[in-house]
Image (cartoon, rainbow, N blue to C red):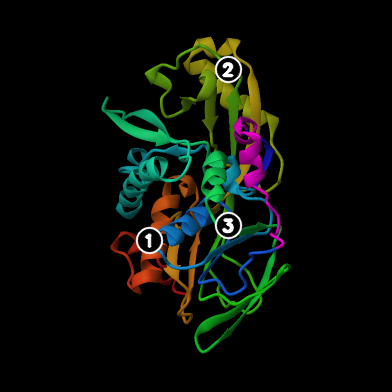
Amino acid sequence: MTVGHALWQDQLTAAERANLDPGVPQRDLTRRPDILVVGGGIVGVATAVACLRAGLGSVVLVERDHLAAGASGGAAGLLIPEAHVHVDAPVLVNLGRLSLALWRDLDQTWPGGVGLMELDWLEPDGQHYPQGRVNPVRAVARMAAGLPCLATGVDVTGVSTGAGRVQMVHTSAGDFTPGTVVFATGTPPRLDGLELHLPATEIKGHMLASEPTSLLLPDSVAGFATSIDDGRILIGGTLDHGDTERVVRPEVIARMWAELEAAWAPARGVRISHQWACFRPAHPDLLPVIDRIPSLGNAWLTSGHYKTGIMMAPATGRALADWIRTGQQPPEVVGLGIDRFHI
């Protein structure tokens, strides 16, 4: 989830805001979809898009709140796989590179694009890499606009299983009988009838954005602060381990800005306009799960994307769609399974 006042919704058009919360359609809410996606963050929406583009039949997405209500709504939106080299596992770096290419493809081929902005990333060795950035909420809204059937304000309460399959998904808007279900719920779903006990937590992180400015950030603060729309300065997010309170802490925001001022004196004349905190879903090894749920032949799960959910969304969605279509695990997600936790 996200608390405080994040910048991203303020940048949307009225139509984009409406796309985030359509409610429950009075008709055309298919009760027997080929694919049911549970979860309306950026990974869930990207998965629904990938399933639709893969020709997997009818696709329905349900979200208990509005779209991008969780960590997606407070993320930085940076698409920088090169920042993970020598920091994270190679599987994550490679998936991130694939996903950046898929973001670019979506921006060119999805109706209305997804609002991708190119970003020049400077590595410590002085090498520049073309990377990317999105307003994550705009990306969700634009992808959602092209989905034929989605519903918000729908709480999934449980599942009924039999013969090694999910037979029915129970929700506050009635029951669904899907051919396949994908749970893209951030943290693993805790539902009646679903035997799934993955270790997971949420890690809080603060972010801020400045008022518009004509100042240009120097390379010396690259990786700590980023220039975004209207010359605003974006900083974050922090890693606030142990802080589970759903509040924005002014002292943390003040410390973040003070660190920028110490590194770059012109920042002292700029005011902060937005401050917020999001709670990133994470597994103990800080890698996502992208897998079929054990003992259920028609149920998949993606969870725990931590700080990389925005970056990884298109590649995660395509991997799940390919897996559902072929029945074979895509090679790019080998190593991201549930079995690594020995549950």
Identify residue for label 2. 212
Determine the image quadrant of residue 258: top right
In reply to whether residue 293 is colored magenta, the answer given is no
Badge 2 local density, few (<14 within 10 Å), some, or many (20+)?
some
Amino acid residing under circle 2: Pro
Amino acid residing under circle 1: Ala
Residue displayed at 43% across by 63% down: 290
Q: How many marks?
A: 3
Secondary structure of the residue carrying tag 2 is loop
Secondary structure of the residue carrying tag 3 is strand
Residue 316: give x, y in percent of width and height: 42, 56
Q: Are marks 3 and 1 in contact (CB under 8 Å)?
A: no
Amino acid residing under circle 3: Thr
Identify residue for label 1. 319
Q: Which mark is residue 201?
A: 3
Determine the image quadrant of residue 101: top left
Residue 183: give x, y in percent of width and height: 54, 65
Closest to the camera, between mark 3 and mark 1, is 1
Query: Relative to residue 294, is residue 40 drawn left or right?
Result: right
Residue displayed at 39% across by 44% down: 109
Which region of the structure is painted magenta?
Answer: 7-26
Query: Relative to residue 340, is residue 306 drawn left or right?
Result: right
Residue 308 vertical position relative to residue 301 in the rendered view, above or below:
above
Residue at the extreme front of the image, as rendered? 27
